Image: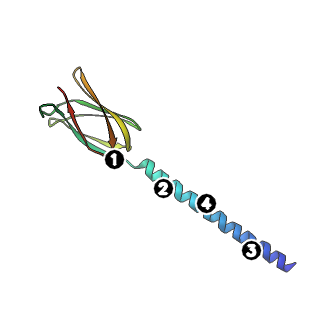
Amino acid sequence: MRFLQMLITLEDRQMNKKQVFLILALVFWLAAFALKVNAQETVRGSVRGADGTPKISASVKLNGPGNYMALTNANGEFVIENVIPGTYKVTVLQSNRYQVFTRTIPGPLELSVPW
């Protein structure tokens, strides 16, 4: 009888170790997933015309895993912070003209428009 109790106790300990291992593995997997989901990028780029002139006050919109918008400065440059990595439809709009690009973040957004 004593041997059976020892065996059951040993099996309980083994089961507890397995459960602890599975729980820890699940926690680490969830933490890694959360870090990947929360990984965000700062996107810097510029918009220039076909002749190389900077496009001032052009609207740059990103639509994809997230939606973002920025305006270009006097040098045609823009910065968008906290962007979720992924593939985006990038739309540049200025006056009544627009151009659509497909880009992957992270990556540079050096955009050239035909006007």
Per the image, the residue denoted by label 3 is 10
- Which of the marked residues, 3 or 4, is nearer the chain's N terminus? 3
Considering only order in the chain, which callout, 4 or 1, is on the residue closer to the N terminus? 4
Toward which corner of the image does residue 86 lie, by quadrant?
A: top left
Please name the residue that numbered disc 4 is placed on: 23
Identity, as a three-letter code, of the amino acid under mark 4: Ile
Which label's residue is closer to the chain start, 2 or 1?
2
What distance separates the C-alpha of mark 2 from that of mark 1? 17 Å
Element under disc 1: strand
How dense is the environment of label 3, judged by Cα within 10 Å: few (below 14), some, or many (20 and up)?
A: few
Q: Label 3, secondary structure: give it.
A: helix
Disc 2 + disc 4, Cβ < 8 Å: no
CA neighbours of label 1 inside 10 A, class few (<14), some (14 to 19), many (20+): some
Provide the residue designation for mark 1: 41
- The residues tagged by marks 2 and 4 sit, at their Cα atoms, a distance apart of 14 Å
User: Which quadrant of the figure has residue 92?
Assistant: top left
Number of the label disc, if any, that sits on residue 32: 2
In the displayed structure image, the side of residue 1 where residue 61 appears, left or right: left
The image shows residue 16 at horizontal and vertical percentages of 68, 67
Of pointers 3 and 2, the one earlier in the residue sequence = 3
Q: Are marks 2 and 1 in contact (CB under 8 Å)?
A: no
Amino acid at the residue labelled 1 = Glu
Image quarter in which the N terminus is found: bottom right
